[in-house]
Image: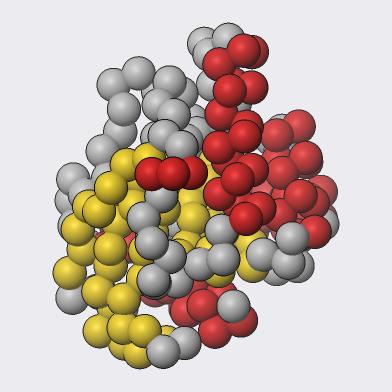
Amino acid sequence: MRPRAASFVISATRPADFPPGDLPEVAFAGRSNVGKSSLINALTDHAGLARTSRTPGRTRLLNWFRVETGKVVAGHDALHFVDLPGYGYAAVDRDLRASWRPLMESYLGERPALRAVVLLMDIRREVSHDELDFVPWLLERKLAVIPVMTKADKLGKAQRLPIAAAVKRDLGLPRMPLLFSAQDKLGIDELWKAIFAGLKRG
């Protein structure tokens, strides 16, 4: 699966700046430096569409991208990807992290257009308190959670599935995390299938 086109729409720092919810939305969440930009660029086949901040963990922006899928799902042949601020960056002080929370909760908890959340986790890192708090919060709101283990190429094939299974167990996820590698182009088609399933569910 490769979309027909993808383009940047808008950045928002407050709910008043959010664009009209005229298309279904899929949000991308994860710790800083987990590879959200690489994953979005790989899914859209558009290098440079999502750009990594020069100061990881400091951006407070929600970034919207319009993706023309060329496939009608849930009544639309396009959708919005929404890149959320990374969490858990050690160099960001507690007050700044706390200032992001109302914006994130407003979007994730109150956005009617939101259909699914792609939750990225670095396959080399253990599950953190952030994910242990975040996943139940998402599931309580009946959002489709699509877990993805990024940077899978950094580990041998025999190591990957046991780690994914442990993450599924530890977080109480309804499905096994997908394995993704931007370098090896691993997991792109599987993730698109999961996204389309999330759109239909919504």
Left or right side of 171 for 50? left
Residue 179 in the image, given as x and y percentages of width and height: 52, 58
* Quarter of the figure with the N terminus: bottom left
Give the mark count: 0
Instruction: Give residue 9's position: percent from left, percent from top.
Output: 25, 53
Residue 196 in view (yes/no): yes
Residue 85 falls left or right of residue 146 = left
Image coords of residue 95 (percent x, y): 62, 12
The image shows residue 150 at horizontal and vertical percentages of 48, 48
On screen, residue 13 above or below 82: above
Which quarter of the rendered picture does the C terminus lie within?
Answer: bottom right
Give left or right: position of 8 versus 100.
left
Residue 39: in sight, yes or no? no
Q: Residue 172's image quarter?
A: bottom right
Quarter of the rendering containing residue 138 = bottom right
- At horizontal 62% and vertical 34% (from top left) the residue drawn is 102
Instruction: Give the quarter of the image for residue 30.
Output: top right
**Residue at x 25%, y 84% (from the top left corner):** 70
| The one of 162 and 130 positioned closer to us in this rendering | 130
For the residue pair 166 and 148, the one nearer the viewer reads as 148
Q: Write the residue at 51% across / 67% down.
A: 113
Residue occupying the point 54% across, 21% down: 89
